[in-house]
Image (tube, rainbow, N blue to C red):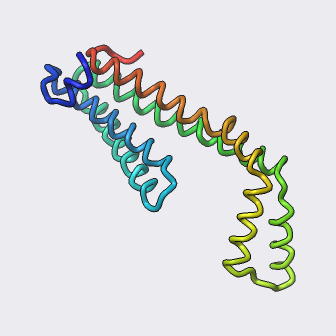
């Protein structure tokens, strides 16, 4: 069974398989949208993830067969474990940048605020620009080691689950 056949509508899949793939699609779309740092797009992604997670819990509770129950449990575990991977990654990212980055421009701005000089929006933007320029390499390395494991883990789990669902097999 091919995914392109499913997308065309002539898949020959059961309704259970179609429901499972719909939940996977919600989670996959939500995960991708959350990584797009433009306007409200990440909030739309978070909405997809929340709807997908709630749907997975509901379908798992109502499941009469092992295929639906297994895949929904797999989706739920994937979301919670990937959230933990992301949390650890963000903490690692912040630790790497905080310990190794040049924070002098932030300290300068904070010292001004401590003596009563409220920074303007222009001051803050200038500080952000200086911070990013001074720490480009360390931010890139921190993102590589801290944040890259999240999408890799998520893609690995979701693609594996989708492949099993298309075949009608329970997840590993």
Location of residue 85 in the rendering, given as x and y in whole percent from the top left corner: 59, 35
Vertical order, 78 against 100 (above or below): above
In the depicted structure, whether residue 170 falls above or below residue 16: above
Q: Say above or below: 43 vs 149.
A: below
| Residue 166 locus on image (x, y percent) | 27, 20
- Residue displayed at 73% across by 48% down: 94
Q: Nearer the viewer, residue 115 or 35?
A: 35
Expressed as whole percent of the image width and height from the top left, the position of residue 162 reads 34, 24
> Quick one: 30 or 126, which is closer to the camera?
126
Q: Is residue 59 left or right of residue 113?
A: left
In the rendered view, tell whether residue 65 sits above or below residue 142.
above
Q: Is residue 11 left or right of residue 107?
A: left
Instruction: Note whether residue 88 is visible.
Output: no
* Residue 130 makes an appearance in the image: yes
Instruction: Give the percent coordinates (x, y) of residue 122.
Output: 69, 78
Q: Quadrant of the N terminus?
A: top left
């Amino acid at each position: 069974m091919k995914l392109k056949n499913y997308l065309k509508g002539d898949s020959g899949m059961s309704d259970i398989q179609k429901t499972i793939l719909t939940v996977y699609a919600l989670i996959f779309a939500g995960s991708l949208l959350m990584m797009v740092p433009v306007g409200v797009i990440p909030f739309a992604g978070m909405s997809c993830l929340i709807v997908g997670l709630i749907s997975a819990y509901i379908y798992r509770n109502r499941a009469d067969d092992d295929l639906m129950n297994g895949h929904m449990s797999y989706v739920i575990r994937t979301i919670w474990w990937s959230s933990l991977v992301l949390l650890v990654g963000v903490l690692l990212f912040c630790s790497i940048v905080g310990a190794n980055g040049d924070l002098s421009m932030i300290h300068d701005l904070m010292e001004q605020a401590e003596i009563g000089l409220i920074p303007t929006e222009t001051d803050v933007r200038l500080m952000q620009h200086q911070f990013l320029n001074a720490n480009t390499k360390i931010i890139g390395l921190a993102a590589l080691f801290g944040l890259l494991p999240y999408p890799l883990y998520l893609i690995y789990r979701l693609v594996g689950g989708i492949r099993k669902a298309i075949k009608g097999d329970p997840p590993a």
